Image: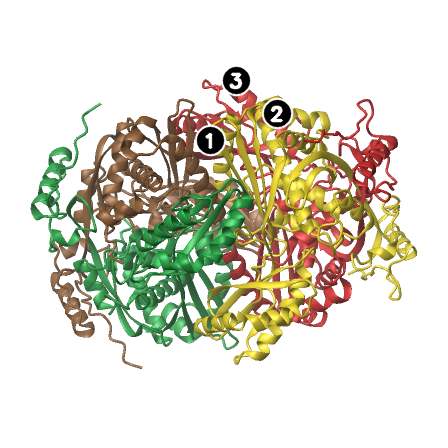
Chain colours: A red, B yellow, C green, D brown
Amino acid sequence: MAERVPVPRDPGNDYTTDMAAQRRDFVARRTGAELKHTGSYSIEPAVVAGNIENFIGVAQVPVGLAGPLRINGEHAMGDFYIPMATTEGTLVASYSRGMRLLSECGGVTVTVAKHAMQRAPVFHFADARQAREFGSWLGEHFAAIKEIAEATTRIGKLIDIEQYAVANLLYTRFNYTTGDAAGQNMTGKATWAACEWIKGQHPLRPHYMLSGSIDTDKKHSAINTLQTRGKRVIAEVTSRNEILERLMRVDTRTLFRARQVSTAGSFMAGSAYNGPHSANGLAAMFIATGQDAANVAESHAGITYAQLLDNGDYYWSVTLPSLIVASYGGGTGLPTQRECLEMLGCYGQGKADRLAEIVAAVVLAGDVSLGSAVLAGDWVSSHDRLGRNRP
Amino acid sequence: MAERVPVPRDPGNDYTTDMAAQRRDFVARRTGAELKHTGSYSIEPAVVAGNIENFIGVAQVPVGLAGPLRINGEHAMGDFYIPMATTEGTLVASYSRGMRLLSECGGVTVTVAKHAMQRAPVFHFADARQAREFGSWLGEHFAAIKEIAEATTRIGKLIDIEQYAVANLLYTRFNYTTGDAAGQNMTGKATWAACEWIKGQHPLRPHYMLSGSIDTDKKHSAINTLQTRGKRVIAEVTSRNEILERLMRVDTRTLFRARQVSTAGSFMAGSAYNGPHSANGLAAMFIATGQDAANVAESHAGITYAQLLDNGDYYWSVTLPSLIVASYGGGTGLPTQRECLEMLGCYGQGKADRLAEIVAAVVLAGDVSLGSAVLAGDWVSSHDRLGRNRP
Amino acid sequence: MAERVPVPRDPGNDYTTDMAAQRRDFVARRTGAELKHTGSYSIEPAVVAGNIENFIGVAQVPVGLAGPLRINGEHAMGDFYIPMATTEGTLVASYSRGMRLLSECGGVTVTVAKHAMQRAPVFHFADARQAREFGSWLGEHFAAIKEIAEATTRIGKLIDIEQYAVANLLYTRFNYTTGDAAGQNMTGKATWAACEWIKGQHPLRPHYMLSGSIDTDKKHSAINTLQTRGKRVIAEVTSRNEILERLMRVDTRTLFRARQVSTAGSFMAGSAYNGPHSANGLAAMFIATGQDAANVAESHAGITYAQLLDNGDYYWSVTLPSLIVASYGGGTGLPTQRECLEMLGCYGQGKADRLAEIVAAVVLAGDVSLGSAVLAGDWVSSHDRLGRNRP
Amino acid sequence: MAERVPVPRDPGNDYTTDMAAQRRDFVARRTGAELKHTGSYSIEPAVVAGNIENFIGVAQVPVGLAGPLRINGEHAMGDFYIPMATTEGTLVASYSRGMRLLSECGGVTVTVAKHAMQRAPVFHFADARQAREFGSWLGEHFAAIKEIAEATTRIGKLIDIEQYAVANLLYTRFNYTTGDAAGQNMTGKATWAACEWIKGQHPLRPHYMLSGSIDTDKKHSAINTLQTRGKRVIAEVTSRNEILERLMRVDTRTLFRARQVSTAGSFMAGSAYNGPHSANGLAAMFIATGQDAANVAESHAGITYAQLLDNGDYYWSVTLPSLIVASYGGGTGLPTQRECLEMLGCYGQGKADRLAEIVAAVVLAGDVSLGSAVLAGDWVSSHDRLGRNRP
């Protein structure tokens, strides 16, 4: 077995142009790959401390400008130009097409219905009866637990603790509001403090694991769809048939028929989402605005619900029950990411709900566009024209 | 209602430095956001044609170097240094820690068990009986359909057609191998040709939709987990207790106990994955190597299966049933993305399975690291040290 | 700890009136419960040998007569009177109401779309690569395996073997047609023979478990809904608005609106069925006709799919993907059960598909009735009138 | 189209021996089936009023006596003999075998962890924002709503109202304790009263449907597994290896290995239960004791969780999150059903939790027996010996 050659690091200050270059050289020597473009960046290495380790440079992900998209939110109001970072041809064009339709229909109404980021410790007992009694104790001591948890954070507020009894275990979800941060670490730290206090206070000194896996961090789950993870956001539009026919070459009746088929298929398939493609818009906006792209796993889940109105208009809504976005923390402060947030008026404090509204509206735009294209027969041809169909 | 102001475009040649700058100016004028860093890029705008529309610049996503990771695949063999593009502090360090453990254990055995990318047309009939007869007809005409479908592509091969009868509909999945491409567009085009042929040949001239939603494109689903989407890849390691204790400060028995709890929680929660966090590694590698980050939705699903052996060793495996990766097409040819693929020896033809093996091995490394950290109590503290716990 | 007192048994001939009485006396002595009615039965104890052990008498479950229901199946054609064994007031009346509607609409079209009963062995290997190679071997030896499996049964035919790779395991589903029997035991025996042969023939002598749990016997599952367990049966009706309004006091437009809500709710809830209540009709018919009532677990799953037609008519369908019914074997030959099968022309050979068609038609009748009642506001009041709302 | 011939009814008093006979004659004339045994019953037709309509006689379902089973519940304590009504050979013998093992291990510890029966109205609004505000209003008016709901019932208590926002809808679950009744009708009536009050009080006069389908009545669902429907009951045993080996011919280590495989298979398959076969015991006890057999749909869901202890003992638990049982109402008062409840000391008031404990313990017994038999190779052979393997 060959010797293990570790990546060069400078324990003093690793976030320097030089260390990044040393590591690129190391890669070049060991793999033959020249990292010329990866090593071309305008940001200061020092700014990525806390965001990455063993920094070698940047991925340059092309950003396209979609929109404008008219949004009637409570936090986002007006016409927005949307930065989307993607390498998938057609995506920006398709979303833009949907944005035009939504805007002509008067814009998207968006509502943040619920906030709940969680850490989900599980407590171990000798038997289920102990676990049940502990569950009661937990309820009775909620105020104290809340105080302990909230002492670890300026922002996070413990809202409630869900309980799920299984075997001699009590699975819980500690739900928080987390201000403008996504809050996974904040809630982890607060819940850990709470658990340590609980362990010290409860007569049984219960053993716990900080996650019993039902926070389903970075994972889609039924529990997220039901109970919310991050933000539960709803985007709605009522589209006139005339506008749909003119812009999308499809009528509302055909859309509604197709919706029945898509929903039945999604139901049978056990799909996380019964709309066309939330993940595309989410991934593109997440990368552009410094969100955690891994949260596409949770965030892409959703429920498309539509009704054909008596006048032939079409009510189309998307509910995203586990949308995780932040205007603060994580990658939001990095240079290009911050710029893209600023373009949306979403950088910094008090902006996370605004960003959530914009993201949900964008998802609806993409669904309207792709959903119509599939029916109008534009799907394959537009990819041939705009994308890289080079098989 | 304010007038809709479209994004500036040059119908002649839109992929120029100048047009990108014009659009950034447009953004600055309309939103006040200066896109200085977004406008700093080393790539030629011309190269992103086919990858994006309305190009304005790039997201600079920091790349860290993890590894080395020893892999015993059929396509990837040896020690690999892994480029990970992320803004989440601790991630690269944590994955590196897992890679060290896996390497000390002799490396990760990885196997690509199945290939199947699909487009899923649904066919409409007067009643279920017609749909059933059509299903038989489809089976009888498979050879002809295969010929038609494959005539649209140099690479894609139609393997089989799954059938799912519901109501007066026949949902299908046309499954292909797609070489080194992810293949969503390739299979779309091939299946569209097949459907048009079917519509012309079958006496009932059946109406169809090119997707009945059970391809579950950009969505997690039960059907993907069962039937595969993209590649079904399995990473395995057998870890000695001594190594785990030394590197991770946790013993195999404790890990196995905790696995029972995590799996029961994941089962109850209806989770797409019962391991710690596949999506983190996937998203970071997808962004670095020009994969479609939206495919984190499908790709993060998986099954962790472990056994404690009689000698105290720990068998730990991850099965990713719907991993979508490409070494060709999409964003793989863009400059930084290509460099990162080259670092892995994964750029171009004949490399997609190699990339799939590496990605699955990385996922296992991340799970070993986080799974151990949660038990050893390092989880919160390491985030405090390395990440941005600034609430 | 008190001594364990076993139930009296006669090792010679346990299926006698006397032994049943002795056991009832035993119960009376030990629990104080007199089993007078339980001990009142008209059947010969000898006939229940093979159906029960420690026979003490019978549960007298009231049977009501619903119908007539007009069915346009391939096996069931005409007007049927339906025996339903239940203790839930309103049920027979409600189903009858639905049957009347369906009959006035011209009857229910029913189609058995697929047959597949399975046993699902899992094979163990050293690693995933061995498992994958074994999968290929399995495909290559299908003809021989089929011969071995079918040698154990006069009726069962091995159709195919599904493969699902996970870790170092290969999960399979051996799918059979099983004639008029439900076939769980038949397929168990045949698959066991096949597995023993495989173990003897394959060079690795693979260890196996006869069930890896993905037959999901007596359990609802996503895999059953997709791949079928037992029979996949589809019942369809097109209802005229006028008839619905007259009989159900609800119009087709209102029904369709409500369908959107029910389906969205079912999708969010992760429900096994998006119709009102398949299980009621299934349980009542299963008990009456000697089916295994535990199979309500699998059989109640389904997909309701509806469309509002341009003329205002309403297409309503139910797809039951895992309906398990038999006209032979199990409890079908017991006296009252056989009588109820005979009432449907469903006793004995060549009748299972006919029974499947009737059952699916009954499910649709119940859904039409309850689905309409909920909207017309009859739901609570009819239970008050007919049922036992006595708390 | 033949004339529709309705079933004979006597509008004055339909629950008579004579009317039952007239209907059997009617069946005989129209179908040729003689209902001799179905017409042989010891119960008074008058007693089934409220339980069935169009009564024609009874299904005689054989009852076997299993046990004794030692139970350490809070309500059920001691050794129990279990009446099981089934037509599936081997079932009673297999459950008895498991009961013996559990008893020798000291008995089953059973805990009722939660009570929650629900009706789930959905409220309609103009948009999601209205729905969200209504959700707040609902919380603020809980006390008044509770009073209204509880005025309709002597027993039911409204515990809380879960809210799930989707589109312009607010789905809710009104959760009740329902004493000794299953409570579907009780909660329906109470919730209907509450909804009418809400509709009258809330300024928007919101339109509602009494079920938005997320009560998932008579259906398995993820929401039931998480949030409980009926009772959440946990049965636990710690089994000594020596006893398992002696009685079941399998050791604890082998069981635990197999558990990993079963759970991974169940997880992949999207199974409602990861244990062997809860539905068998449930169906048999439900029929014997006058429960609603359709509730097997909900009740069979569950979570098997096990641990191998350091001393080689095996902790085995079953959590049934949606077990629906009653000791009062429904079919519990019918003659044979009441006798079987009396045999368990479970007839009448204050007995439902006792019954729930017994049922859960029986489920565990069946799982231990079948789970062991599959591994010991007894599965097929015992069916050949005791059951009707007559293919």
Label 2 lies in what chain?
A: B
Label 3 lies in what chain?
A: A
The answer, for residue C276, to whether it is visible in the render is no
Task: Tell me if A144 is positioned left or right of C202 in this view.
Answer: right
For badge 3, the amino acid type reads Gly
Disc 3 crowd rating (10 Å Cα; few below 14, some 14-19, many 20+) is: few
The answer to which image quadrant residue D64 occupies is top left
In which quadrant of the rendered image does the N terminus of chain B lie?
A: bottom right
Q: Mark 3 highlights which residue?
A: A200
Question: Marks 2 and 3: in contact by CB < 8 Å?
Answer: no
Question: Marks 2 and 1: in contact by CB < 8 Å?
Answer: no
Where disc 1 sits, the SS reads strand
Give a yes or no on whether discs 1 and 2 share a subunit.
Answer: no
Q: Which mark is residue A170?
A: 1
**Real-space CA distance between mark 1 and mark 2, rounded to the nearest whole angstrom:** 26 Å
Q: Mark 2 highlights which residue?
A: B248
Chain-order first, disc 3 or disc 1: 1
The answer to which image quadrant residue D58 occupies is bottom left
**Real-space CA distance between mark 3 and mark 2, rounded to the nearest whole angstrom:** 26 Å
Task: Tell me if C266 is positioned left or right of C189 in this view.
Answer: right
Disc 2 crowd rating (10 Å Cα; few below 14, some 14-19, many 20+) is: many
Q: Return the residue nearer the eye: D22 or D72.
A: D72
For badge 1, the amino acid type reads Leu
Counting labels gives: 3
Give a yes or no on whether discs 3 and 1 share a subunit.
Answer: yes
**Real-space CA distance between mark 3 and mark 1, rounded to the nearest whole angstrom:** 17 Å
Residue ID at (16%, 46%): C55
Q: Return the residue nearer the eye: C317 or B253.
A: B253
For badge 2, the amino acid type reads Met
Q: In the displayed image of the protein, which residue is found farthest to the right?
A: B18
Residue B43 in percent (x, y) is at: 87, 50
